[in-house]
Image (cartoon, rainbow, N blue to C red):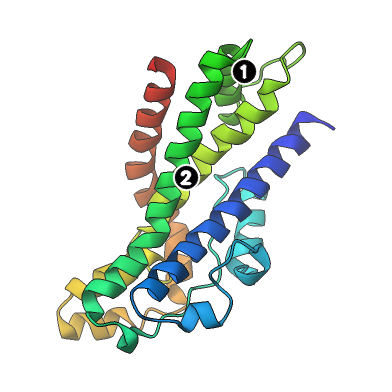
Amino acid sequence: MSLDVLLILFQVAVLVFAFSVHECAHAYAAMRLGDPTAYMLGRVTLNPAKHIDPWGSIVMPLLSLVSGAALLGWAKPCPVTTRNFKHIKRDDILTTLAGPVSNLLMATVALILLVVLKHTSLDGGRSVIFAMLIAKHVPLPTEGLSNMFPIALLLYYGVVTNLLLFVFNLIPIPPLDGSRLLRYFLPYEVEKVYDQIGTFGIIMVFFVGVRFLLPIFYSPLLNTFDGLLQSL
């Protein structure tokens, strides 16, 4: 199997798992806060089939791969019936935050595992450095790398992908989680206009969110994780 194919497979596998955890976190938080809607629809699960959205989970990641951009997308929105919450605003905000926070936690776990691999495995340090560079599209020879390299690469994609999803989903443009958070802090008249964005929001996500907002917040966050990985 060529390295290019391996990179694509690893990225897709990590993305699908990240989607599943993200949506499961939404559903679980809603259930614990009093809304069983997502639970009754079988969304408190890591089964990807329950969370895949045709546009966000298939079309957008494919467009990202073809264009050479970062692998991004979203899953089927988690259904929430806010009237089931005891404290509607607070509980809906917590439910919304559960998804992005789960991605940040997964990125942190992947970072910790990379640090452990770096210090406990023979040739682990070299495998981790090569994984970081190859994931950033730096052409390097992979002959002679240990069996730890694929594990390091998979874990590093766990860092990259989950940090991307964490920042991406907090962009305040529908249908992303950030828009659901922002609307609670808008004046009523502005909120009504904001809710009318609808499918136009997907276009805005591409041309405003991905091109301008995402790099502003994602790059410093990834640099922080990279710095920790290199120094710990």
Task: Out of 232 and 70, give the one closest to the viewer.
Answer: 232
Q: Circle 2 sits on which residue?
A: 106
The answer to whether 3 is drawn above or below residue 11 in the figure is above
Q: Of the residues shown, which amino acid type is indicated by label 2?
A: Met
Residue at left offset 39%, top offset 85%:
81
* Residue 117 coordinates in the image, percent (x, y): 56, 21
Please tell me the numbered disc located at residue 127. 1
Would residue 206 appear left or right of 2 to someone viewing this image?
A: left
Q: Based on the displayed image, in which of its 4 quarters is residue 189 positioned? A: bottom left
Would residue 179 appear left or right of 118 to someone viewing this image?
A: left
Disc 2 versus disc 1: nearer the observer: 2
* Residue 138 coordinates in the image, percent (x, y): 60, 22
In this view, the residue farthest toward the bottom is 83
* Residue 139 coordinates in the image, percent (x, y): 65, 20
Q: First in sequence, mark 2 or 1: give its number.
A: 2
The answer to whether 207 is drawn above or below residue 175 in the figure is above
Task: Out of 18 and 196, give the one closest to the viewer.
Answer: 18
Please tell me the numbered disc located at residue 62. none
Q: Based on the displayed image, in which of its 4 quarters is residue 230 positioned? A: top left
